Amino acid sequence: MKDLNSEYWSDRYKNGETGWDLGNISPPLKAYFDQLENKKLKILIPGCGRGYEGIYLLENGFINVFLADYSREALNEVKKNAPDFPDNNLLCANFFDLEGPFDLIIEQTLFCAIDPALRDDYVTKMEELLSDEGKVVGLLFNKEFEGGPPFGGEKLEYEKLFSESLQIELMEGSYNSALPRMGNELFFIAKKRK
């Protein structure tokens, strides 16, 4: 197994090895954001990459958007794309070291980038980072990959994994994925258990 540390991810950016990058906001997340009314939600996007989703939120009046990535190179790309993005809201950190709480956490290619042996820890950490009424919303690959990252999976596996710490409100095939991912993504919403 590769050491998926910050140096590994920074090297991927430096070498242009960012096949996960859509070059724009993911359509299912844009559709979800467009129906949100509370612009004061405290939002975290871990593993943000070039930050398209966070930049979109900021441009649309959301005032508490935090982008986190293990790679300083990724966050430099965010600043290049959005020079006005608040520096204090760009967190160069390992996901497992982040501190909450957040009202909304967006999953967009972080889950598939971590070692599958850490998936239980990932779900536990999500639950820990959420505010009492908080939700995790995002996309998961509904297919297997050779090697990795990305590391794939399937719906039944995710349902079992997530339901141990969170309450799943929705997990279904994404009807509006970006073309390269059409038919291979699940859109999900999970919230903190009461």
Image: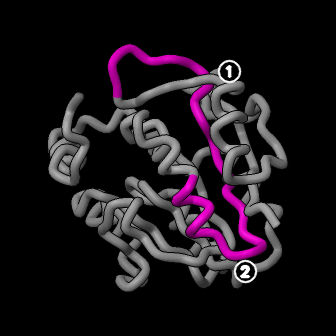
* Residue 153 % position (x, y): 56, 24
Q: Nearer the viewer, residue 50 or 98?
A: 98
User: Which quadrant: the C terminus?
Assistant: bottom right
Residue 131, quarter of the rendered image: bottom right
Q: Which mark is residue 183?
A: 1
- The residue located at (38%, 74%) in the rendering is 90
Side (left or right) of 101 relative to 3: right
> Which color scheme did the rendering employ for the protein?
one colour
Residue 140 lies in the magenta-colored region: yes
Task: Please name the amino acid that badge 2 sits on.
Answer: Lys
The crowd level at tag 1 (other Cα within 10 Å; few <14, some 14-19, many 20+) is: some
Q: From this view, report whether residue 161 is shown above or below residue 89.
A: above
Q: Nearer the viewer, residue 121 or 94?
A: 121
**Mark 2 residue element:** loop
Q: Nearer the viewer, residue 36 or 139?
A: 139
Side (left or right) of 182 relative to 1: right
- The residue located at (57%, 59%) in the rendering is 126
Task: Please name the amino acid that badge 1 sits on.
Answer: Gly
Q: Nearer the viewer, residue 151 or 71?
A: 151
Q: From this view, report whether residue 111 is shown above or below residue 193.
A: above
The magenta region covers 124-148
Mark 1 vs mark 2: which is more N-terminal?
2
- The residue located at (72%, 69%) in the rendering is 134
Residue identifier under label 2? 39
* Residue 69 % position (x, y): 35, 60
* Residue 3 % position (x, y): 20, 39
